[in-house]
């Protein structure tokens, strides 16, 4: 079967079309700033050479699209504090190497603390069942992962598991985008919206962006042609002054998203203010457990006493996430901070902008 | 792709992998990718049938997808496993 999403001639045509549009007003004498929200889009944009192809014409900004990267230093310190208390930590693998102010989970493991890497949060049920120790799942993630975490809570309640809780560090994307545009000084001309977050939330939550700010949004897949289509849509929309939410990933993203998943989220969680790395506290951008599930909240169950901590000295991950700087502007990039010796989370995570820049280079 | 590579890919927080449903029982289903079978959770997806392709994230089927879209994504994942890990 012909793979239409990898068809080079289609991609070349698309890029030529974008090139043509970029020579016309309003782009003729300025660079466009497009922010991709998903870390996997950052990887695709670098890997397939879009950044170099559009150099000086389009500036791609890496946004708050990696759940590990946006976790604040204070929250990483909370995770370390829990490990030091002797509870068994269950976490996605990416978090292991992220340094807190004094230590990382990897270092805690070396000191003999119990840390289990899980791919499916439901694996925590089995871990909790097999031990008498307290198990805490570090619940990072956006809307793609949150229904799964909600299911973990519902199952734990149903199975009456008493020694399991979560550290709720979940965040929601559309609120963050609104905050980016309102509170942080940026000149964003368009958003490439995350594919798999959109599978859950659908098209509607992004509509405030074109309507309130006049900024176009494109929901995109991850193939080269998907990225090309997204760029072409953004440039065309700006040129015609018709900003909308354009869904170019209809093969997976439905207009209303996944309604069952959204119901699950609603049943278990409610909105709360949370701290994002690089943003500070963003009102109503996170989720906490509803009162009837509060016994599964590790923050309440264990007395975690962690003060706010500054980001590592010299690290600009916060500014990279906020679209203010590029990884290569960091004095530590590829010198003191590498994937083997990461100083900030954007160099740790596979989806982090610094890690992607390091891997694919920047000319 | 060998099982170890698949595990490495799946550890990445945000990636979603297409699987084909082999059998289902309640909210669980057995699904296959690259000849490797595993149990997935289908509770947030209505109307899942045997032989459907579904996008799986963190052990959960989050959306159905057509065969062509599934093959495209699988090709991409093969590339990732060969080039990046």
Image (cartoon, rainbow, N blue to C red):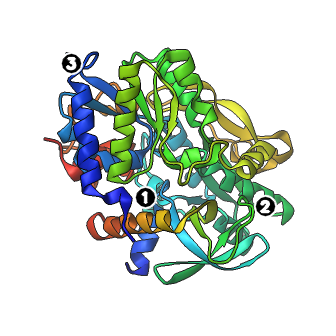
Q: Is residue A267 above or below residue A176?
A: below
In the rendered structure, which disc, 1 or 2, sits on the residue that comes first in sequence? 1
Q: Is residue A171 above or below residue B43?
A: above
- Of badges 1 and 2, the one in the foreground is 2
Which numbered dot is residue A156? 2
Q: Image quadrant of residue A346?
A: top left
Q: Nearer the viewer, residue A54 or A175?
A: A54
Q: Please check whether the numbered discs 3 and 2 fall on a single chain.
A: yes
Q: Toward the viewer: A198 or A4?
A: A4
- What is the spatial separation of the Cα atoms under label 1 and label 2, in whole angstroms? 27 Å
Per the model, the C-alpha gap separating discs 3 and 1 is 49 Å
Q: Nearer the viewer's eye, disc 3 or disc 1? A: 3
Where does the image place residue A5, in percent across and percent down from the top left?
37, 57
Residue A181 in picture, x, y percent from top left? 48, 19
Circle 3 Cα neighbour tier, 10 Å, few/some/many (<14 / 14–19 / ≥20): few
Tag 2: Cα neighbours inside 10 Å, few (<14), some, or many (≥20)? Answer: many
Residue identified by numbered label 3: A28
| Most foreground residue, A305 or B26 | B26
Q: Give the class, few, some or many, for how many residues have Cα within 10 Å of label 1's Cα (few <14, many ≥20).
A: some
In the picture, measured across the screen, residue A336 lies left or right of residue A127, that is: left
- Secondary structure beneath label 1: helix
Q: Identify the image quadrant of residue B80.
A: bottom left
User: Under tag 2, what secondary structure?
Assistant: helix
Say whether marks 3 and 1 touch (CB < 8 Å): no
Q: Residue at x 36, y 70 (%)?
A: B78
As drawn, the label of residue A106 is 1
The image shows residue A187 at horizontal and vertical percentages of 36, 18
Q: Chain of mark 2?
A: A
């Amino acid at each position: 079967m012909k793979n239409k999403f990898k068809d080079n001639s289609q991609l070349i045509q698309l890029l030529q079309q974008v090139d043509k549009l970029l020579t016309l007003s309003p782009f003729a004498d300025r660079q466009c700033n497009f922010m991709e929200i998903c870390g996997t889009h950052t990887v695709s944009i670098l890997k397939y050479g879009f950044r170099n192809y559009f150099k000086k014409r389009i500036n791609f900004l890496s946004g708050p699209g990696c759940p590990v990267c946006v976790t604040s230093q204070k929250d990483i310190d909370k995770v370390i504090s829990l490990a030091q208390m002797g509870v068994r930590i269950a976490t996605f693998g990416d978090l292991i190497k992220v340094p807190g102010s004094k230590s990382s989970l990897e270092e805690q493991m070396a000191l003999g603390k119990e840390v289990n890497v899980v791919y499916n949060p439901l694996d925590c049920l089995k871990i909790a069942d097999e031990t008498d120790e307290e198990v805490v799942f570090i619940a990072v993630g956006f809307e793609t992962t949150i229904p799964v975490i909600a299911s973990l809570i519902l199952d734990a309640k149903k199975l009456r598991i008493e020694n399991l809780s979560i550290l709720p560090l979940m965040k929601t994307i559309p609120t963050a985008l609104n905050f980016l545009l309102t509170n942080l000084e940026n000149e964003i001309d368009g958003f490439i919206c995350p594919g798999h977050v959109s599978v859950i939330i659908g098209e509607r939550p992004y509509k405030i962006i074109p309507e309130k700010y006049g900024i176009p949004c494109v929901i995109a897949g991850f193939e080269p042609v998907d990225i090309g289509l997204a760029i072409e849509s953004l440039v065309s929309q700006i040129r015609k002054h018709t900003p909308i939410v354009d869904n170019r990933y209809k093969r997976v993203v439905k207009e209303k998203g996944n309604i069952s998943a959204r119901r699950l989220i609603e049943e278990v969680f409610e909105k709360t203010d949370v701290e994002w790395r690089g943003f500070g506290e963003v009102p109503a951008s996170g989720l906490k457990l509803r009162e009837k599930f509060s016994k599964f909240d590790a923050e309440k169950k264990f007395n975690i006493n962690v003060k706010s901590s500054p980001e590592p000295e010299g690290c600009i991950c916060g500014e990279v996430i906020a679209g203010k700087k590029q990884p290569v502007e960091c004095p530590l990039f590829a010198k003191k901070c590498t994937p083997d010796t990461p100083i900030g989370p954007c160099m740790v995570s596979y989806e982090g902008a610094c890690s992607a820049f390091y891997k694919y280079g920047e000319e | 792709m060998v099982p170890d590579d698949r595990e490495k890919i799946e550890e990445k927080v945000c990636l979603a992998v297409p699987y084909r449903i082999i059998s289902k029982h309640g909210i669980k289903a057995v699904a296959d990718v690259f000849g490797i079978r595993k149990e997935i959770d289908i509770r947030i997806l209505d109307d899942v049938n045997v032989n459907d392709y579904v996008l799986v994230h963190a052990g959960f089927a989050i959306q159905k997808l057509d065969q062509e879209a599934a093959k495209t994504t699988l090709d991409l994942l093969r590339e990732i496993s060969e080039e990046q890990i």
